[in-house]
Image (spheres, rainbow, N blue to C red):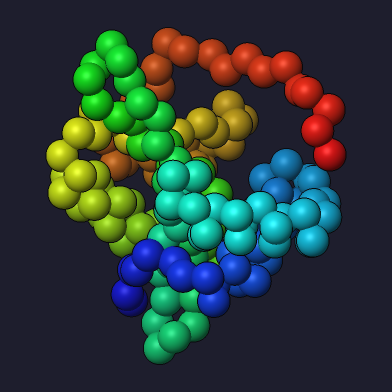
Amino acid sequence: MTVRPAVAADAETIAGFNRRLAEESEGRVLDPHRVEHGVRSVLADPVRGRYWIAERNGIAFGQCLVTIEASDWGGGTYWWLQSVYVEPDHRGAGVFRGLWDAVVGAAHVAGDVLAIRLYVDRHNSGARAAYERLGMSETPYRIYERPLGVS
């Protein structure tokens, strides 16, 4: 398995993974055109984020996205792990671990990353266990949001 930064040619694959992720994890059906537009906007602007692809022989079967949050309190950044998806036939085979290791390695190279964070549905016990095996722990923070009706 190889883990590499995604490139523009990966947009359709990433969008497909994101649609499957939304359906599997939240029962949501996402608009394919909107998702692909969102993915392409991230791939075109590294400030928005950076995708990682897990593949073998040029065939992608896993991904994750890292977005960056500046911390004025800590004088560094937090990397947020998002859009984690591994195709069902490849789960349990170390794909997520490979993605994680690539992200952690890049964070060390960046030099200012205070922590890697993510959010997960509180009922997703499988994902929570996987994150805890990597040394992550639940924080005291809760996430609030106010939708702005942007379509």
Q: Is residue 17 left or right of residue 65?
A: right
Spot occupied by residue 115 in the image (x, y as percentages of width and height): 28, 30
Front one among 86 and 6: 6
Q: Splitting the image into 4 quarters, where does residue 110 fall?
A: top left
Q: Residue at x 70, y 61 (%)?
A: 36
Spot occupied by residue 86 in the image (x, y as percentages of width and height): 52, 62
Q: Residue at x 67, y 18 (%)?
A: 145
Rendered-image quadrant of the C terminus: top right
Rendered-image quadrant of the N terminus: bottom left
Is residue 122 shown to the viewer in this render? yes
Q: Is residue 124 left or right of residue 80?
A: right
Q: Splitting the image into 4 quarters, where does residue 39 fall?
A: bottom right
Q: In the displayed structure, would residue 140 be above or below residue 88? A: above
Front one among 76 and 23: 76
Spot occupied by residue 30 in the image (x, y as percentages of width and height): 80, 52
Q: Residue at x 40, y 29 (%)?
A: 69
Spot occupied by residue 52 in the image (x, y as percentages of width and height): 41, 61
Is residue 93 shown to the viewer in this render? no
Q: In the displayed structure, would residue 108 be above or below residue 61? A: above
Q: Is residue 36 left or right of residue 113?
A: right
Q: Splitting the image into 4 quarters, where does residue 135 fall?
A: top left
Numbered label tally: 0
Q: Residue at x 43, y 51 (%)?
A: 46
